[in-house]
Image (tube, coloured by chain):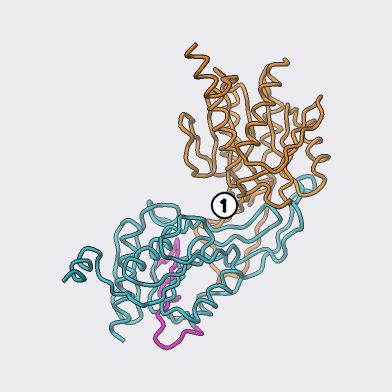
Chain colours: A cyan, B orange
Amino acid sequence: RIVAEVERVLGPNDLDGVRLVVSAGGTREPIDSVRVIANRSSGKQGYAVAAEALARGASVTIVSTVSLPTPPGAVVVPVETAAEMHAAMNAAADDHDVVVMAAAVADFRPASAATGKIKKRDGVPEIVLEPTPDILAGLGENKRAGQVLVGFAAETDDLIANATSKLEKKRLDLIVANDVGAPEVGFAHDTNAVTLLRPDAKPVEIDLAAKRDVARAVIDTIVDIRRTR
Amino acid sequence: RIVAEVERVLGPNDLDGVRLVVSAGGTREPIDSVRVIANRSSGKQGYAVAAEALARGASVTIVSTVSLPTPPGAVVVPVETAAEMHAAMNAAADDHDVVVMAAAVADFRPASAATGKIKKRDGVPEIVLEPTPDILAGLGENKRAGQVLVGFAAETDDLIANATSKLEKKRLDLIVANDVGAPEVGFAHDTNAVTLLRPDAKPVEIDLAAKRDVARAVIDTIVDIRRTR
């Protein structure tokens, strides 16, 4: 009776005993010792997913490029570059049941970082770029039986088509499609508006809502995916 | 007697009635709608200068690229790019007695930002760069009589020589030279180690100290410059 009362107050413990890892923030790729190519992601949506998962009973690891307050109970693995995030997420995927890639990972990086600081008097530098590894595709290839893999697609054009293509190619169980060009949506905002896409389910649209509410919808869907297996 | 007691407790009001503007953070230059070229500056040293100036009685404006807590009493002008910071600092210089450029400004930026998000499937983009305006040099050229202009030099090589050259060329009254390659120094750290350089005074070295202590030494020097005029 007391347990039920606590559960009623605290909400469902439907991720009890589940290990969830979520990446958060944007990667930073060094140009030289002071400059980087960065993504605008604030990490807020990833941290909201972590906080919601913790509230639902999960053990949570956050692979993070940002220094937001750590939700009580979470383990934070700090990373900066796409290569560091790649290594940390691959390691975490080995012993986590749910893997959520909420971070914005650089698709390209300077092929080599300059030593020290590029001097203005040396003129405008040429920055040669190279592609970074596709972390989410790698996680999809190596997905373990029973593991749930969730991606985010931040798009400015052809949102649903691009996100559906990623869902299929990267063997995801859920993709959270995010029109970052819309007002009050995505990077740095406290609100978000997304569409949840699954391989064999109708799209679910979440209208403009707090990032914690979006996180709740994402976790609800993860619980549903796990239940229907 | 009460006023004196309050002054003793609160420290010297030696910037009473003085208007000080300080820039803080690193500029971000858009590559496309989600990616930027950024500088690593956390804005902490600039905000520490603002807090110290407020404690000493100044009216303070912060031209900021970051979202740190606003020190009580300060006015914050939010900016993102070097062009926005250029405009904001030029406007502020018109009616501020002390101008401190603590921000890390991009020396170069993408010549044009892509519309929307560059797609990975389109391959690695070529980013053509162009120089940004030298904000500090412009402030030096237009320096009003009696105005105090302070710059920061974040260097990884030939610190004193590079900073001294900037001090002279940009008509600064003080440059805070900052070896950002040293441990525990500069970007993101809460501590800093700097050398204060003036046109006609011996260099003053501040060993590794809290950024607020560095700010106190900077404000002490500004007060001294104003007093000896």
Indicate the quadrant where residue B124 lies: bottom right
Please, what is the three-letter code of the amino acid marked with disc 1?
Pro
- Picture coordinates of residue A75 (x, y %)? 47, 67
Q: Is residue B108 above or below residue B13?
A: below
> Of residues A171 and A115, which is closer to you in this image?
A115
Residue A190 horizontal/vertical position (percent): 38, 53
Q: Please name whichever residue, B84 or A158, is drawn nearer the observer in this view of the structure.
A: B84
State the extent of the magenta-drawn residues as a range: A141-166
Q: Residue at x 45, y 78 (%)?
A: A96
Residue A128 pos. (x, y %): 71, 63
* A20 displayed left or right of B168: left
Residue A143 lies in the magenta-colored region: yes
Report which residue position mark 1 lands on: B30
Decide: is A87 above or below B50.
Answer: below
Number of marks in picture: 1
Quadrant of the rendered structure where residue A14 is?
bottom left
Apparent side of residue A160 relative to residue B162 in the rendered image (left or right): left
Q: Is residue B2 above or below residue A37?
A: above
Q: For numbered disc 1, what is the local secondary structure?
A: strand
Name the residue furthest bottom.
A145
Q: Position of residue A103 (x, y in %)?
A: 49, 65
Name the residue rendered at 62%, 64% in the picture.
B125
* Chain letter belonging to callout 1: B
Q: Quadrant of residue B138?
A: top right
- Does residue B153 sit above or below A174 in this rendering? above
Q: Residue at x 51, y 85 (%)?
A: A142
